[in-house]
Image: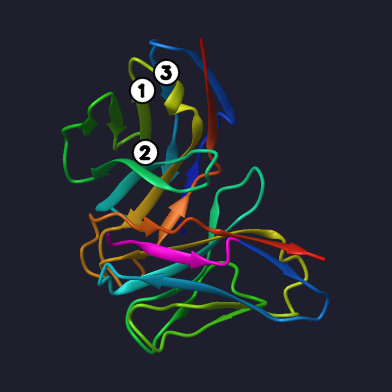
Amino acid sequence: AQTVTQSQPEMSVQEAETVTLSCTYDTSESDYYLFWYKQPPSRQMILVIRQEAYKQQNATENRFSVNFQKAAKSFSLKISDSQLGDAAMYFCAYRRYTGTASKLTFGTGTRLQVTL
Amino acid sequence: DGGITQSPKYLFRKEGQNVTLSCEQNLNHDAMYWYRQDPGQGLRLIYYSQIVNDFQKGDIAEGYSVSREKKESFPLTVTSAQKNPTAFYLCASSWAERFNQPQHFGDGTRLSIL
């Protein structure tokens, strides 16, 4: 079974600075998808960024980028120029490439605080 | 606008009572999912359904039941057998075969015990 580990329960960053959230996962499969979701106080789950394991290029979405290290099974999220609205819980998630069970496996989350 | 609607937003259950959480989507997605979120924890999968009239148990299905009679709807019943039902419940949907497409989530239902 796949597992996802987020070892940082809480992180803090100053506005306009850069922060990196860590995620590691365990799988025996070679093809899969990885996601970062954001959950603000409203509790809605919002997709931040996704990465296909077969792509070597790291995904980027505006101020958000990932550092995907397939051999190390690491998938960290970098937030540049942090804004107050970035304060939220961030969840890393894994999804199989094929098969009948296209479910997500989530980590336990990292709570990000953004300070002035 | 397309999306996922969960109702009610807040729900209270008495001892020995079954309660049903509603989830409706108009995204024309094939697959639907129910997750449970406890404080300080990630989301855990309760049940999922790839097509109408078919569903599979997730990691924590005991004490829950579902049905999928329509593509748009995937209600979750929390039965009296679920001894610790207090949690935040999230419904999601996605394309069944397009695995690079993300799951879309509803706004959740918070269930508490009276």
Relative image position of residue A48 (x, y in whole percent):
33, 39
Q: Amino acid at mark 3?
A: Val
**In magenta segment, residue B90:** no
Relative image position of residue A2 (x, y in whole percent):
44, 54
Q: Which residue is mark 3?
A: A19
Magenta segment boundaries in residue numbering: B1-9
Does A24 sit left or right of A61 as displayed?
right
Mark 3 chain: A
Say what secondary structure mark 3 lies in: strand
Mark closer to the observer (3, 2): 3
Q: Are marks 3 and 1 in contact (CB under 8 Å)?
A: yes
Q: Is B111 situated above or below A66?
A: below
Q: Which residue is mark 2?
A: A73
Q: Which residue is mark 1?
A: A79
Relative image position of residue A76 (x, y in whole percent):
38, 30
Instruction: Tell which circle, 1 or 2, labels the residue nearer the N-terminal end.
Output: 2
For disc 1, the neighbor class at 10 Å (few under 14, some 14 to 19, many from 20) is many
The Cα atoms of the two marked residues, 3 and 1, are separated by 5 Å
The Cα atoms of the two marked residues, 1 and 2, are separated by 20 Å
